Image (cartoon, rainbow, N blue to C red):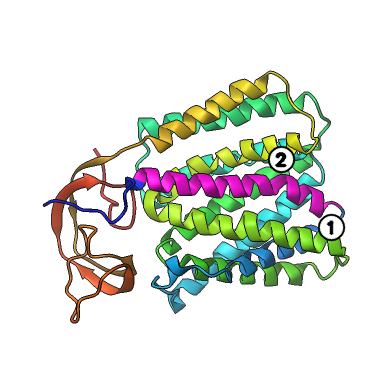
């Protein structure tokens, strides 16, 4: 069977670019979080960040008008996502950044990718080939190189570093829990996660002092871009390339955050910067140039997500006919074909 796609870019590359945009937005938010979160309580900071993220979901987007909606059975998963990713992780990060430098805090977040890849392999059996392993090693190695240098130029709190790593673990759990939601409307997911996370954080922040106007505005804007818009791109990337690859590319965020921190006056780490930049660039190249395609079989299944009838997978009939992207519950018959693909909802077959 021939396969025609309604996107010009191969799915792995399209997903890689989406993940890189998400990483850029989140990476730039880390030094901003340290600036506006200084002197603020960790739960109040987390609440403002995800209130901003929820506000970002109100931005109009014609792309998501025909997406599948969240369902009642998604509520327990959304609560887990909000608890891990919108309460525990940002609160730990805010607390940790108050006790260490923005450069070091950004780089420590690179461990999130490793934890996410492991969880994606355990729970979703996502393939981890040599190319992906090499890319993750390059990006992680670049951050580790800078981390070693950063430790020699600043005095940091061990507890602050531990808190940032705990944030990375919590966000990895968030990434794994979010994977099944990636095929739902991303605006709805961002809105639900942001609203739940903000509400839970504000309840826990009742004993913390009220933030200043400057901190409130700064954290809301930081949350809108670095946590709201970034999450929307992250979900779209997960939809195309799965949780593991998205996290591996997202591991560039710490390097981006560190560069932004240096640009705002944080101490640099000397000659390690060029070598680390080269490693991160090599890892990104491995992802952005990745291609994957082979003969594979699809089992019969029923689900609901946005789709088009020119993608080679959706052959059901509408009366009257429907053109373009749309969503509704639909059935897939068993089929076999060959085309480029990523580990999306239709391609979760095993590889020998």
Q: Position of residue 277 (x, y in %)?
A: 59, 27
Determine whether the residue tagged by mark 1 lies in a helix, strand or loop.
loop
The quadrant in which residue 103 appears is: top right
Q: Which residues are magenta?
A: 12-38
Residue 119 visible somewhere in the drawing: no
Q: Position of residue 198 (x, y in %)?
A: 68, 68
Q: Main secondary structure of the magenta part?
A: helix
Q: Residues within 10 Å of mark 2 (few under 14, many from 20)?
A: many
In this image, 91 relative to 211: left or right? left
Determine whether the residue tagged by mark 2 lies in a helix, strand or loop.
helix
Q: Which residue is at the front of the view, 221 or 168?
A: 221
* Residue identifier under label 1: 40
| Residue that appears at 63% across and 71% down | 195
Q: Which residue is at the front of the view, 317 or 344?
A: 317
In this image, 279 relative to 127: left or right? right
Q: Are marks 2 and 1 in contact (CB under 8 Å)?
A: no
Q: Residues within 10 Å of mark 1 (few under 14, many from 20)?
A: some
- Residue farthest to the top, as pictured: 271
* Residue identifier under label 2: 105
Which quarter of the rendering shows the C terminus? top left
Q: Position of residue 207 (x, y in %)?
A: 85, 68
Magenta stretch contains residue 247: no
């Amino acid at each position: 069977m021939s396969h025609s796609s309604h996107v010009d870019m191969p799915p792995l590359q399209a997903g890689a670019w989406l993940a890189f945009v998400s990483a850029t937005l989140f990476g730039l938010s880390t030094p901003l979080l340290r600036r506006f979160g200084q002197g603020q309580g960790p739960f109040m900071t987390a609440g403002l960040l995800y209130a901003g993220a929820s506000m970002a979901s109100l931005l109009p987007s014609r792309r998501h008008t025909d997406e599948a909606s969240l369902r009642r059975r998604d509520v327990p998963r959304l609560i887990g996502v909000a608890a891990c990713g919108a309460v525990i992780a940002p609160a730990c990060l805010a607390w940790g950044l108050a006790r260490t430098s923005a450069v070091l805090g950004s780089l420590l977040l690179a461990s999130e990718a490793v934890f996410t890849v492991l969880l994606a392999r355990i729970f979703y059996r996502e393939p981890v080939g040599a190319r992906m392993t090499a890319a993750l090693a390059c990006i992680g190695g670049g951050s580790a190189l800078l981390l070693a240098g950063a430790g020699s130029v600043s005095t940091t709190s061990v507890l602050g570093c531990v808190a940032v790593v705990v944030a990375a673990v919590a966000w990895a759990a968030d990434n794994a829990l979010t994977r099944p939601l990636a095929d739902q409307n991303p605006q709805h997911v961002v809105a639900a996660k942001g609203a739940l996370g903000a509400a839970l954080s504000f309840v826990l922040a009742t004993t913390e002092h009220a933030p200043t106007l400057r901190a409130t505005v700064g954290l809301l804007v930081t949350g809108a871009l670095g946590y709201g818009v970034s999450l929307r791109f992250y979900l779209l990337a997960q939809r195309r390339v799965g949780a593991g690859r998205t996290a591996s590319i997202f591991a560039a965020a710490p390097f981006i955050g560190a560069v932004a921190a240096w640009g705002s006056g944080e101490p640099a780490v000397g000659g390690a910067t060029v070598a680390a930049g080269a490693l991160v660039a090599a890892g990104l190249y491995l992802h952005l140039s990745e291609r994957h395609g082979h003969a594979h079989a699809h089992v019969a299944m029923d689900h609901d997500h946005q789709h088009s009838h020119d993608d080679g997978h959706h052959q059901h009939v509408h009366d009257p006919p429907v053109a373009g992207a749309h969503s509704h519950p639909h059935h897939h018959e068993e089929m076999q074909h060959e085309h480029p693909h990523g580990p999306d909802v239709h391609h979760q077959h095993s590889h020998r």
